[in-house]
Amino acid sequence: MHSIDYLRTLVRRWRILLAGALLGVGVAVDIVLWTTPMYAVTTTFYVSSTDRAPTATTAYEASLLAQQQVQSYATLLGSERVAQELAARLSDGLTAAQLQGKIGADVVPQTALLVATVTDGSRTRAHQIATALGPVFAAVVESLEQPPDGGPSPVRVTVVDSASAPSTVSPRPLRDLVLGLTAGLLIAGLAAVLREATDTSVKSLDVLRGLTGGPVLASVGTQDKAQRQMLREHRSPNTEAYRSLRTNLQFLDVDHPVRVLTVTSSIPGEGKSLTACNLALALADAGKRVVLVDGDLRCPQVCAYMGCTSRAGLTSVLIGASLLEEALIEGRNRLLRIMPSGPIPPNPSELLGSARMAELLERLKQDADIVVIDSPPLLPVTDAAILSHLSDGAILVVRHGQTRREQLARATDQLRAVEARLLGSVLNRVPSRGPDADPYLAYGYYNSAQPAAPLPGLVNGASLLGIEDWRVNVGGTKATAQSRPANHNHMTGQS
């Protein structure tokens, strides 16, 4: 991954970063609130030689000796002997062991300076201990360095800086909050990168093309409840996406146009039913005679989207309980007919794979330009594979960020196994914002309030391409239309 890929990952996984930041700050706040305050007081000692008439040589040697000795004195500061002497002088109830845990020492590099730090939960007691430590430590050093003959000690320890004002060691709210936030973001960033590395969902058109081996016919944006109204907003980005799907289907194979089309997906919840309904409406709006068949006999959704109700349907026709004309419902567009699923049968796969189903599709093709079948997902059941085999081709709907690559590969293999033709795929619910956004879905033209000018070749919103009812007047220069009666049944030819 390049640096830009890491940045996109962090932007895409911003929820993980936010959770990590909140967690880090929360832990820091908890530490600040529950940590017992600690205060520190420092005292600085200077170690020197007691030679009263030093030469240049002896002064240098004394300086080296002092720097060497100061390392030992740093350890001596925390020794039991110093603590015992200090406990005897303070007489405040603290034991030598308790005092040892409160005293620390640091040597200033390349000097003979020694800094003692006393840490305690009480400001006053910390200052008292540091104040008493100066003379006690100097006395201990003098007694240890005194020669055996009783002469003066060659080393002197002098208090340079007496006990300072107590300073807060912990907690430090600002520092702790910054550290907590930083730690939370770092951990969340690592988690986001790891999550991205292990995420096998489909998020790009290139990946989708590579896995299916076919073209991506459309990229449809995220649809909320208000947008699932099937092309009512005639110039919204999603409406244009379905029209693009319609156009791409027309140009897939001009010599052998698709007459029966199955819309399916790998798993449930990818938007196949909504895609089938919108595609049928887009085809009807372009002047095609369309039959939309709800072939999902396990969880039918077409009537829920199209707002139709009927007791008869596909299963009714297949078992001979209803005539074909009784199962067809006129859609919003006069060129659209809808065949609901009918009663849910106990054996959907057997019904869909029967000879009657193949005969029914042939009958529908006689009076329709295209038959669109909404089928179940491929992986859970075999219904979609059966319908795809009976059709001229299948469209595979893939949900952005949810369908995994291995699921898509298995679904494609199932279509190949039944020798079904995969026409292409539709990437559904693509975000219009963020690193994975499709910039064309957010194009400002679609939100314009001005009416769109009619395109060349369009008359009253109906495309001249592939419409049998349109005829060219040989003696003139313009096209004329032969109208049908409003109650004409395109499936039976009866009025």
Image (cartoon, helix red, strand yellow):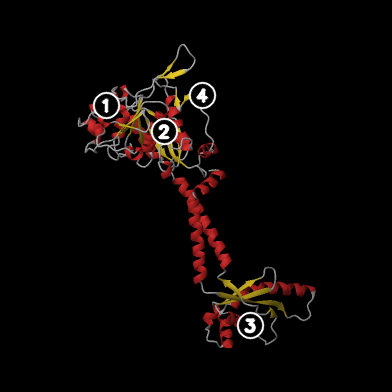
479 on left or right of 487: right
| Labelled pair 2, 3 in contact (Cβ < 8 Å) | no
Q: Earlier in the sequence, mark 4 or mark 3?
A: 3
Q: Position of residue 29 (x, y in %)?
A: 51, 66
Crowding at mark 4 (Cα within 10 Å: few <14, some 14-19, many 20+): few
Q: Position of residue 44 (x, y in %)?
A: 67, 76
Q: Earlier in the sequence, mark 2 or mark 3?
A: 3
| Labelled pair 4, 3 in contact (Cβ < 8 Å) | no
Q: State the CA–CA distance, disc 1 to disc 4.
A: 37 Å
Q: State the CA–CA distance, disc 1 to disc 2.
A: 26 Å
Residue 482 lies, with reference to residue 35, above or below; the image says: above
Q: Earlier in the sequence, mark 1 or mark 2?
A: 1
Q: Which residue is mark 2?
A: 425
Q: Quadrant of residue 402?
A: top left
State the SS at label 2.
strand
Q: Residue at the top extreme?
A: 475
Disc 3 marks a residue whose amino acid type is Thr
Crowding at mark 1 (Cα within 10 Å: few <14, some 14-19, many 20+): some
| Labelled pair 1, 3 in contact (Cβ < 8 Å) | no
Name the front one of labels 1 and 4. Answer: 4
Disc 2 marks a residue whose amino acid type is Ser
State the SS at label 3.
helix
Q: Which residue is mark 3?
A: 131
Q: Quadrant of residue 166?
A: bottom right
Name the front one of labels 1 and 3. Answer: 1
Q: Position of residue 103 (x, y in %)?
A: 58, 77
Q: Which mark is residue 360?
A: 1
Q: State the CA–CA distance, disc 2 to disc 4.
A: 28 Å
Disc 1 marks a residue whose amino acid type is Leu
